[in-house]
Image: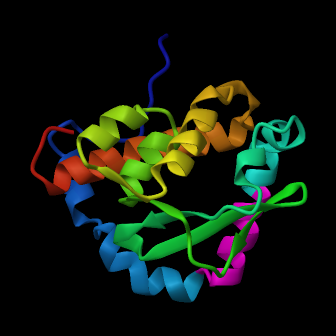
Amino acid sequence: MPTANFLPQPSKRFAPRLLRLLPPPRRLQPVLRIVVPQRWQRAWLEAAMARVLATPIHDGSLDFMRGRKLAIEVTDLGLRWVLTLRGDRLGVVDEEPEASVRGSATDLLLLASRLEDADTLFFQRALVLTGDTELGLTARNLLERLSWESVPLGLRIALNRGARFARSARAAHRGQAV
């Protein structure tokens, strides 16, 4: 007897309706500021960077960031982190950046999950690099060379699923095929 999943499966035409019920990221901004304070964001981001970038930090590939400041801005969530390398740790600082990478939560998730190429997102103007472009491009090139297998499995799965979900939700809000 074949096994069957007895839970109802959303149809392809029903899924967009469900996704359109979700609020867009910009509407989550006030809630996010209350639920996830800045100090928690910093701690989580620094811990994730320490794990993912341990090899480039220790082998000197990230030395170009020493004393330099690069911002990551999630425009629709109103988030901004300025990163710098101090000692053997990449950390978040309260200083003005020399360069900034800006994009929506969905586009930055697509980039981080490697579901979209950085060049494609920049040429589509989904991501914008301002300030010291050499610093931003050097950081981007280092991240592209980073082995995907060096990223912890749980983080790879979370990035992939989160990016696919965000892309589907954005398509549903735009009335596009999911």
Task: Give above or below for 101 relative to 151.
Answer: below
Residue at (63%, 27%) from the top-left corner?
145
- Name the magenta segment's main secondary structure: helix
**Residue 9, visible in the rendered structure:** no
Residue 102 falls left or right of residue 85: left
Extreme residue in the top direction = 1
**Residue 131, visible in the rendered structure:** yes
The answer to if 71 sits in the magenta stretch is: no
The answer to if 44 sits in the magenta stretch is: yes
Location of residue 26 (image quadrant)? bottom left
Task: Give above or below for 92 relative to 72.
Answer: below
Task: Give above or below for 16 relative to 151.
Answer: below
Residue 133 falls left or right of residue 60: left
Q: Position of residue 59 (x, y in %)?
A: 87, 34
Residue 44 falls left or right of residue 38: right
Residue at (65%, 81%) from the top-left corner?
94
Give the quadrant of the C terminus: top left
| Magenta stretch in the rendered image | 36-47
Residue at (29%, 45%) from the top-left corner?
168
Q: Position of residue 100 (x, y in %)?
A: 47, 62
